[in-house]
Image (cartoon, rainbow, N blue to C red):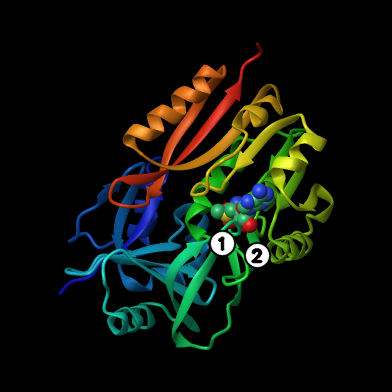
């Protein structure tokens, strides 16, 4: 049986990452470089995680395991690993695989599914201490994460970086489903903007405030606990609205579009299949929105993917 770890990197940055991985002697030339939507999968040797310094260029956060006869992946969040299985996986094999390939793993959970409005994960302990709190770094930001009390996924770190790069100083931004704050933190770190971040989960809001404080960004972000669909009415209009709650049904999209300034931008994340994403895109075009970027963030199921769409509201 052979198993290969791949660094998953956005297409535009893949060449640079490949050169860097070759230089560091992590690249495994005997295995194929593959495509995954807008991303490239580069086969690497197991100890790539040790090179924390290449995270920003390469982001080897999401390691995919593709052993024959198994189908799963795991996320690394600080010293916690969370296994996601698509088909039935031999859990002992996965635990041993992770422990052998990663040096610093304290706890391994199996993802039993995400539920409800607050998107909390049902986690089963497979290895180590049942302590869901850890510190996690991405794009020069540090975050306290509690994988049981608030939603967090490291898989969007490149997305958050790209969105933050698109923001210009002076924007007034609403991060509607902020969670523990990764979008707001990435933007506040790189720009001088006024950001409003809101989440309905009080534990997420507490972590968000803590994360702003440890990154010294408290004064850049106004935090609200509550229902964003209500709060937006009081605080609009915004130059940019970020909607990252892709699995739950979005409400009041007409009103949200109306809450943008002329030329304002909407960054929206959706889990759809090829057909339904086209329908959703037609809706926005019908509302006078101009599509600026469309990316496949990652595959979600056999037929569905997570899409990242950026629209600009053109003056009517
Ligand atoms: C998929 S998570 C995204 C979190 C964050 N943007 C991230 O990238 O980690 C969606 C978040 O939206 C929050 N949420 C769900 N409905 C909400 C609402 N009506 N108003 C505010 N927050 C809400 C949930 O508590 C959850 O933290």
Q: Earlier in the sequence, mark 1 or mark 2?
A: 2
Side of 104 where 233 appears, left or right: right
Side of 87 where 18 appears, left or right: right
Residue 281 visible in the snapshot: yes
Q: Secondary structure at mark 1?
A: loop
Find the residue positioned furthest to the top: 316
Where is residue 295 shown, x and y percent of the image? 43, 37
Q: Is mark 1 within 8 Å of ligand 1?
A: yes
Q: How many marks?
A: 2
Find the residue positioned furthest to the right: 219
Where is residue 41 shown, x and y percent of the image? 31, 53
User: Does the CB distance between marks 1 and 2 fall below 8 Å?
Assistant: yes
Alpha carbon of mark 1 to alpha carbon of mark 2: how far? 10 Å
Side of 22 where 183 appears, left or right: right
The residue pinned by badge 1 equals 152
Quadrant in which the N terminus appears: bottom left
Q: Residue sitting at 37 percent across and 73 percent down? A: 47
The residue pinned by badge 2 equals 143
In depth, the one of 125 and 98 nearer the eye is 125
């Amino acid at each position: 049986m052979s198993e290969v770890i791949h660094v998953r990197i956005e297409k535009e940055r893949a060449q640079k990452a490949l050169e860097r991985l070759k230089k560091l002697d992590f690249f495994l030339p005997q295995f194929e470089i593959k495509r995954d939507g807008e991303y490239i999968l580069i086969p690497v040797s197991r100890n790539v995680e040790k090179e924390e310094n290449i995270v920003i260029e390469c982001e080897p956060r999401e390691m995919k395991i593709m052993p024959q006869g198994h189908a799963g992946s795991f996320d690394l969040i600080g010293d916690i690993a969370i296994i996601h299985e698509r088909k039935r996986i031999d859990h002992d094999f996965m635990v041993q695989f992770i422990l052998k390939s990663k040096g610093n793993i304290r706890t391994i959970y199996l993802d039993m599914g995400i539920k409800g409005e607050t998107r909390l994960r049902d986690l089963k302990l497979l290895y180590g201490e049942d302590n869901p709190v850890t510190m996690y770094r991405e794009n020069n930001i540090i975050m306290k994460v509690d994988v049981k009390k608030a939603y967090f996924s490291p898989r969007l770190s490149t997305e958050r970086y790209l969105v933050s790069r698109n923001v210009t100083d002076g924007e007034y931004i609403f991060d509607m489903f902020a969670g523990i704050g990764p979008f707001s933190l990435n933007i506040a770190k790189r720009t001088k903007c006024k950001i409003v971040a809101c989440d309905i989960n009080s534990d997420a809001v507490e972590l968000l405030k803590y994360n702003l404080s440890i990154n010294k960004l408290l004064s850049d972000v106004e935090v609200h606990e509550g229902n964003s669909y209500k709060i937006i009415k009081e605080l609009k209009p915004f130059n940019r609205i970020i909607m990252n709650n892709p699995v739950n049904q979005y409400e009041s999209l007409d009103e949200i579009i109306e809450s943008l300034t002329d030329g304002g931008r909407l960054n929206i994340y959706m889990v759809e299949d090829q057909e339904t994403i086209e329908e959703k895109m037609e809706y926005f075009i019908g509302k006078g929105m101009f599509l600026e970027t469309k990316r496949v963030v990652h595959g979600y199921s056999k037929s569905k993917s997570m899409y990242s769409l950026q629209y600009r509201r053109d003056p009517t």
